[in-house]
Image: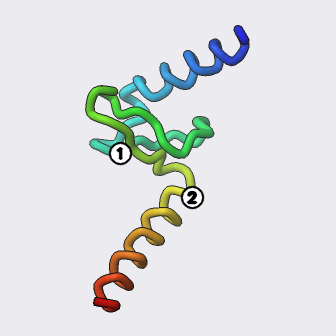
Amino acid sequence: MKKKRREDEYLNTMSKDPNNWRGPFYVNRKDPRLVVPKYNPARGYTFNFASPYAYIIIIAVILIMVAASYLK
C-alpha cells in the first residue's frame, strides 16, 4: 500500500515539473501514464505526448469524427 502511494506521489511530482511541459503539452518519456493531470489539476487532464498511444488515440478520434460526418 505504501509503495503504491509513493509511486503516485512520484508520478504527480513528474507532472508538476515545468521541465516536462512544452507549452500546453506534457512530454515525459519516463512517465508511464497515458493521461496525466494538467499543470493546474483543476483544469483537467491531458495526454502524455511522449507516448505513441496518445497519437494513435488522437488519430482514431479524428477518423471517427470524419467517418461520422460522411455517414449523415
Image mark for residue 8: none
Relative to 10, residue 46 above or below: below
Q: Secondary structure at mark 1?
A: strand
Q: Which mark is residue 25?
A: 1
Reading the chain from its start, which is encountered first: label 1 or label 2? 1
Quadrant in the rendering for residue 62? bottom left
- Residue holding disc 2: 52
Q: Residue at x 44, y 47 (%)?
A: 47
Is 34 situated left or right of 39 in this image? right
**Quadrant location of the N terminus in the rendered image:** top right
Which amino acid type corresponds to the residue marked 2 in the rendered image? Pro
Pick the residue in front: 11 or 71. Answer: 71
Q: Nearer the viewer, residue 41 or 32?
A: 41
Q: Residues within 10 Å of mark 1 (few under 14, many from 20)?
A: some
User: Where residue 52 appears, x then y in whole percent?
Assistant: 57, 58
Residue at 34% of width from left, 76% of height from top? Answer: 65
| Quarter of the image that includes the C terminus | bottom left
28 or 59: nearer the viewer: 59
Q: Residue 45 at what x, y percent from top left?
A: 38, 39
Extreme-top residue of the structure: 2
Q: Is residue 58 left or right of residue 3?
A: left
Residue name at image x 48 percent, y 19 percent:
13
Give how far apart the Cα atoms at labels 1 and 2 are: 14 Å
Local crowd size for mark 2, using a 10 Å CA cut-off: few (<14), some (14–19), many (≥20)? few
Residue at 49% x, 63% y is: 57
Q: Provide the secondary structure element on which disc 2 rests.
A: helix
